[in-house]
Image (cartoon, rainbow, N blue to C red):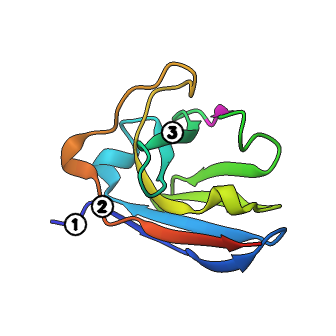
Amino acid sequence: QVQLVESGGGLVQAGGSLRLSCAASRSIFMLNAMGWYRQAPGKQRELVATITRGGITDYADSVKGRFTISRDNAKNTLYLQMNSLKPEDTAVYYCNTAGVRVSVPVPGRDAYWGQGTQVTVSS
């Protein structure tokens, strides 16, 4: 029944890097644009990066130039390479379906939310 499984989070010092992965069912992955979302304690979930089926990407201003979203269609896997991490990046990160632009967000499918993966960046 599990359709989206996030992994790769952890504890890292400011300036460090992490690579997140999202294993998806093929039916979800091949029919939708995908995105990475994050939710910090006490805050709303926000969309930080999107990628279309054709590989066109978009990013929130807060992560632009530091994060890279990619997808491997053969493996049905979504990635988020996170470089130059800052303490304000600390959050639980989720993958889900998404719109094509971060500035015009389309909420992910309710039924697809997984448990996410925790990213903690220390000062």
The CA distance from mark 2 to mark 3 is: 15 Å
Element carrying mark 1: loop
Left or right, residue 45 beside residue 68: left
Q: Which residue is mark 1?
A: 2
Q: Are marks 1 and 2 in contact (CB under 8 Å)?
A: yes
From the top left corner, tell me how far across and down residue 28 is, in percent. Answer: 31, 46
**Quarter of the figure with the C terminus:** bottom right
Q: Where is 1 relative to 26, above or below?
A: below
Q: Which residues are magenta?
A: 55-59
The CA distance from mark 1 to mark 3 is: 22 Å
Left or right, residue 118 beside residue 88: left
Left or right, residue 112 beside residue 75: left
Say whether residue 87 is magenta: no
From the top left corner, tell me how far across and down residue 18 is, in percent. Answer: 69, 71
Image depth: mark 1 or mark 3 in front? 3
Q: What residue is at 26 percent from the left and 39 percent from the top? A: 109
Q: Which residue is mark 2?
A: 114
Task: Report crowding for label 2: few under 14, some 14 to 19, many 20 or more residues within 10 A (C-alpha).
Answer: some
Q: Which residue is mark 3?
A: 47
Q: Are marks 1 and 3 in contact (CB under 8 Å)?
A: no
Q: Residue furthest left?
A: 1
Task: Report crowding for label 3: few under 14, some 14 to 19, many 20 or more residues within 10 A (C-alpha).
Answer: many
The CA distance from mark 1 to mark 2 is: 8 Å
| Sequence-wise first label, 1 or 3 | 1
Q: Nearer the viewer, residue 78 or 53?
A: 78
Q: Amino acid at mark 3?
A: Leu
Element carrying mark 3: strand
